[in-house]
Image (spheres, rainbow, N blue to C red):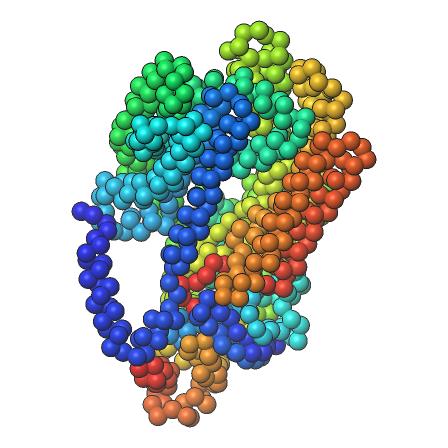
Amino acid sequence: MKIELRAVTKRFGKTRALDKVSLEFNPGEIVAVLGPNGAGKTTLLRCLAGIAGPDEGEIYFDDRPLRRDDLELRQRFFFLADFPFLFWDQSVLRNIGITLRLYGADGTGAEHRVLDLMRDYDLLPLAASPASSLSRGQAYKTALTSLITANPEVWLLDEPLASGMDPLGLSAFKRHARAATVQGRTVIYTSQLLDAVERFSDRVCVIHNGEVRAFDTLENLRAKSADRANVLEELFRTLRSESQ
Amino acid sequence: MTLHSPQFEARLRSAARRLIRENAQLRREWKRAPRTPLVRQTAVLVIFRLLCAFVLAAAVFASSEAGLVWSTQSAIGAIWFLASAILLRFRILNTFYRIDYLAAFTVLPTPTDVVVRWNWSRVTRSAWRTGLDAVAILSAMAVTNAAGVGGWLAVLPLAALLTALVHALAVWLTFVPLPAVLNLLPLAGIVAFVGLVEASAWREWLVRFLAEQSETISIALPAGWVLRPYLAWLTSSRLESLALLIPALGLGASLVWARRQLANHYSPFAWALWHVFQMPPEEWKARFDEFLAAQPAPPGRTEILDSVEKREFLQPSFKADAGGWIERRVLACLTPREWTVIELAFFAIPRWTRLALIGSGLLAVSILSAAIAKRTTDPSIQAIGTWTSIVCGAVGGLVLLPLNTGFKRMAQPINAGGILIPFGALFPVTMKELMRVAAKASLVRGAFALPVMVVGGSLLGLALNTSPGWAAFAAAKITLLAVASTPMILALNQSSTTNDTSIVTFRALPVVGAFLAGFIGFVGLGVGSIFSPLPWSIIWIMLAAGISAGMASLYGELHARRSFDLMTRPKET
């Protein structure tokens, strides 16, 4: 699904969290959204997920403007906050079950997919445990299992690389995300971990003070950079020196 | 050890400002950084409180103008301060058990007594509200009773005593389990009072009621122990009322003991650990271990695999035959998708049948009490019967009628990285779906409540020697209004966590204005329909239902268009 932001502005009081942001995300790519604290990364994700509404501009999913009552469109994307929303008094399986039913993804074969993912994320022993007994990483893995089984066209993930998942969990997540992009899914995530981003993104979107300062592939960014080995760090240093 | 050091914070602030002044970029960022609009918040709070104090004083003036008995003034104050104490009781508990603060304390080396002191300082800072009300009512009494210098000099000490008394009562009430719905009682009381005053048929009853009961009220309710002696002194009548100051002083002084008791019973870390980190402290651990030992063994790997293979986790968790009659009927009306929506909204089967039965029982008590009060000649039994009838009738009606939709969970704010997001925001569920499910549930609950209300209304009419037909018809209309209010209540519930985070555009103001006008219109038409004959009453109800549906549609459309955010204003973007 093609996602397009056309001159999107979002204000919080006098602060412009997003300032006339125009972007286009293509199917089958992993995009990392980077920026200093308070740059507007999470606001961008929240706007894409319909949690925040733009003050100006519009967001289109396959040329269709986003409306919160458009259930069919709403079921095509999945927003995973940095600390996932779970039903804390319910078991891990019940959490996955209700999310899949809400996404209409409970058809035949869903159970096998869930089983495979629970094995991958070491959740099987916790299947009957209440979500309240999970660690942060385990909670994130539970939400990821729902997401991957629901198989939405767009994955919107806030700080998945700093979600508390163990190295094997992170590795499984990256593998599943990459496999999803092969099927034409789009993965958009925020992060502050530049090393990991360099290895796990097709394109990088750098936001600073609500403005898009770079949106390109890493190869192109490297080609323009003086420090090719640390292109993203160099970019951040430039932003900081501009500020000062 | 104290949690708040103004000197240290002032030093830090001035050092930070010095650094910011020296750097142009930091100055720009400082200007752009969001800050809590403390002045505006405080101004709104003060204006609202002044308005409350004005209403209270106006009620005293009005009772004096109307020539009501002198004890009416103290009765008005006594009821007001009882409501204040109940609200304060909830505020104290909310302050002491505020989960995000407690979660922070659990990871800081903070002794419990320091937390208690800090919480008390926050509660005490809000004492000015009660103090202002007390000054307002005592001043109004002084004016209406032409007080001399002594009378005016007594206003401030008595206001202080009244404030201490209300606070003591509120603290003692924290040991009494009260349903959260009591938070709404003051608002419901004001609406009921306006309705009574506006309806000429009931105004006489209200005047008679105040004439007969104001003595009882001002002696029975604690705030009356201060207000009544003051009035007696001003009017030089019933000076024996001065003796009431003794229990008033006693209750006021018990504030110290009450606070100590609350501090002794306060275990914030146990609570916070249990809910936030799921690590029960030692004294709870033993009990928890016992509980676990008594539970069946957790399913093994084979059982889990088997359960997943059988798709049990994908089946609805609400069984069609679960719950009571109302729950079963509601579930029978829902489509499979709506079934999932109601599970998301409730997770445990709602207890509507139980609520309806409790409400019906309370209505029966109300009718019985009214009948006893009407037939007895003993004034004390009359007073107790009347009061029991009113309280049971009001609470029974609130519980029985579908006024509490139960869908508030969808709007329950969840902390997500420093901002609050309504629980339902992250799931693919539309407002229309939610409205449809709530409307179906409300219709079924209304269908149960209607015959109970009609029979209850006619019996109450008989008990009060008024027309049973009129009373039954009024009860039916109240039930229809309750059902009709569902879309409006749901929209108001959901809107509690949706915000115009832009603020500077003021685009929320027309919407708030439209909602306020709609709410007032609904209440006005509702009250009008109860006291109007046919066919007007039906027309008013239909108009009220139209307003309710209109408000829900307006909110639904704005929600769909993302005219507001499903979050509070973020600290970080």
Q: Nearer the viewer, residue B402 or B333?
A: B402
Position in image of residue A57 (x %, y %): 58, 75
Q: Is residue A5 left or right of residue B445?
A: left
On the image, which quarter does residue A193 sit in? bottom left
Q: Quadrant of the C terminus of chain A?
A: bottom left
Residue at x 50%, y 27% (from the top left corner): B64
| Image quarter of the N terminus of chain A | bottom right
Q: Residue at x 74, y 44 (%)?
A: B543
Q: Is residue A240 visible?
A: no
Q: Is residue B127 left or right of residue B466?
A: left
Please tell me how many numbered marks the rendered image carries: 0
**Left or right of B298 on screen, residue B539:** right
| Front one among A130 and B335 | B335
Furthest residue to the top? B377
Residue B77, percent from left and from top:
45, 29
Residue B390 visible? yes
Along the viewing direction, whichever of A109 and A57 lies nearer the viewer: A57
Is residue B484 shown above or below B202? below
Q: Residue furthest right?
A: B535
Residue at 43 percent of width and 63 percent of height: B570
**Viewer-closest of B554 and A182:** B554
Residue found at x 49% / y 23%: B72
Q: Is residue B296 depicted above or below B223 in this figure?
A: below
Q: Position of residue B128 (x, y in %)?
A: 35, 41
Residue B441 is drawn in which quadrant? top right
Compared with residue B217, is residue B115 higher up or lower down, i.e. above or below? below
Residue B208 position in % (x across, y down): 59, 19
Does B136 sit above or below residue A50? Answer: above
